[in-house]
Image: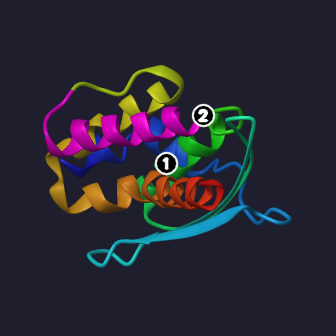
Amino acid sequence: MLDDIYNTKILEFAGNIPLLGHIDNPQAQAKAHSRLCGSTVSVEVCVANGLITSFAQDVKACALGQASASILGQHVIGATPAEVREAYAQLHAMLKDNGPVPTGRFADLSFLEPVRDYKARHASTMLAFEALVKALDDVEAAVA
């Protein structure tokens, strides 16, 4: 049932999204959009010495997209781009390939495991991480 994916913990995350808004002089910005549900997440990021030092997000998404963005916002400052990419890969594998729950810095993504059974909700759940990976790709391309 949908009660499984809209449980208390997911709704708690969704109602408490950190790092909303904008940052001054972002190194990169990116947006991810789900055509299926219309959800959109935009992010801005700065990276220094291999760590994410500044981050902001604009979240126009369903509760699942909001919950994922909340988890990202809670743990992103101080993360390496590799940690973000690994979390995105783990989230994708958990939802799409019946993989194990995410571990490491972004282990709270494991609370989104009930979404696995609702394919129509996968895209919105991954938006925040998808947008940040795009932005990090742009940061790295600018440095190269």
Which residue is located at x 26 percent, y 58 percent? 121
The part of the chain drawn in magenta is: 80-99
Residue holding disc 2:
80
Q: Relative to the observer, which residue lies in front, 123 or 90? A: 90
Chief secondary structure of the magenta portion: helix
Q: Relative to the observer, which residue lies in front, 112 or 45? A: 45
Q: Is residue 56 left or right of residue 82?
A: right
Give percent across and percent down for residue 128. 49, 56
For residue 63, above or below residue 41: above
Dot 1: what SS? helix
Q: Which residue ends up furthest to the top in the rendered image?
A: 104
Q: Relative to the observer, which residue lies in front, 14 or 20? A: 20
Which residue is located at x 30 percent, y 26 percent? 101
Which residue is located at x 81 percent, y 62 percent? 23
Residue holding disc 1:
67
Give percent across and percent down for residue 100. 23, 25
In the image, what residue type sits under mark 2? Thr
Give percent across and percent down for residue 65. 44, 57
Dot 2: what SS? loop
Q: Quadrant of residue 120?
A: bottom left
* Mark 1 crowd level (few <14, some 14–19, many ≥20, 10 Å Cα): many
Give percent across and percent down for residue 79. 63, 33
Q: Are marks 1 and 2 in contact (CB under 8 Å)?
A: no
Which residue is located at x 48 percent, y 53 percent? 133
Per the model, the C-alpha gap separating discs 1 and 2 is 21 Å
Residue 59 visible, this angle: no
Q: Is residue 115 left or right of residue 14?
A: left
